[in-house]
Amino acid sequence: MTYVVTEACIRCKYMDCVEVCPVDCFYVGENMLVIHPDECIDCGVCEPECPAEAILPDSDERAAAWVEHNRKFAQAWPNITRKGTPPPDADEWKGKPDKMQFFSPEPGQP
Ligand code: SF4
Ligand code: SF4
């Protein structure tokens, strides 16, 4: 089992999650983060830290479609362990539906 980052992170990217992960398994894209499913130890401490409620266990049906997305981009993006500056409009995007259309496959800055 693993936890994954889902659509709610897109354009929010608060990064509170990366500070608490004991195994540093978050990876950063231009406008969202992902978790490497093979590195996550399933501790769950990141889930309540996310202001956007974007982190879910893969046992949640809303997360099922996101496991391969997390795996694919965790292999392509740099590792991130420290909280950076969230986007200035992060609060405006929090809770908005259908954000996948804004997803960027480009790597972010750790
Ligand atoms: S805290 Fe939530 S919204 Fe912020 S980067 Fe982590 S998963 Fe994305
Ligand atoms: S569940 Fe634990 S190991 Fe997995 S990403 Fe969250 S904090 Fe890291």
Image (tube, rainbow, N blue to C red):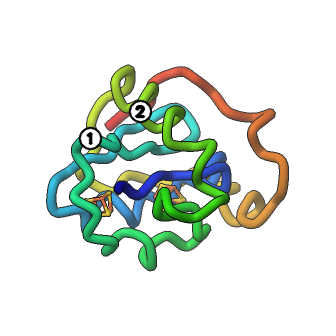
> Which amino acid type is shown beneath numbered disc 1?
Asp
Question: Residue 101's image quarter?
Answer: top right
Q: Amino acid at mark 2?
A: Arg
Quadrant in the picture for residue 76: top left
Residue found farthest to the bottom: 48
Viewer-side residue, 61 vs 15 = 61
The percent coordinates of residue 31 (x first, y second) are 58, 39
Residue 29: horizontal and vertical position, in percent? Answer: 48, 33
Q: Are marks 1 and 2 in contact (CB under 8 Å)?
A: yes
User: Which label was assigned to residue 90?
Assistant: none
Q: Quadrant of the N terminus?
A: bottom left
Residue sitting farthest toward the right: 97
Whether residue 86 sits left or right of residue 19 in the image: it is right
Pick the quarter of the image with the C terminus.
top left
Q: Residue at x 26, y 47 (%)?
A: 25
Disc 2 C-beta below 8 A from ligand 2: no
55 on left or right of 41: right
**Splitting the image into four quadrants, where does ligand 2 fall?**
bottom left
Report helix, strand or loop for mark 2: helix
The residue that appears at 66% across and 58% down in the rendered structure is: 62
Q: Position of residue 6 (x, y in %)?
A: 59, 51
Q: How far apart are the two marked residues, 1 and 2, measured between alpha carbons?
A: 8 Å
Q: Which residue is mark 1?
A: 38
Quarter of the image where one finds residue 15: bottom left
Mark nearer the N terminus (1 vs 2): 1
Q: Which residue is mark 2?
A: 71
Q: Secondary structure at mark 1?
A: loop
Q: Is residue 96 above or below residue 71?
A: below
Which is nearer the eye, 102 or 23? 23
Which residue is drawn at the image coordinates 68% and 33% (left, top)?
Answer: 103
Determine the residue positioned at 26% across, 70% down: 43
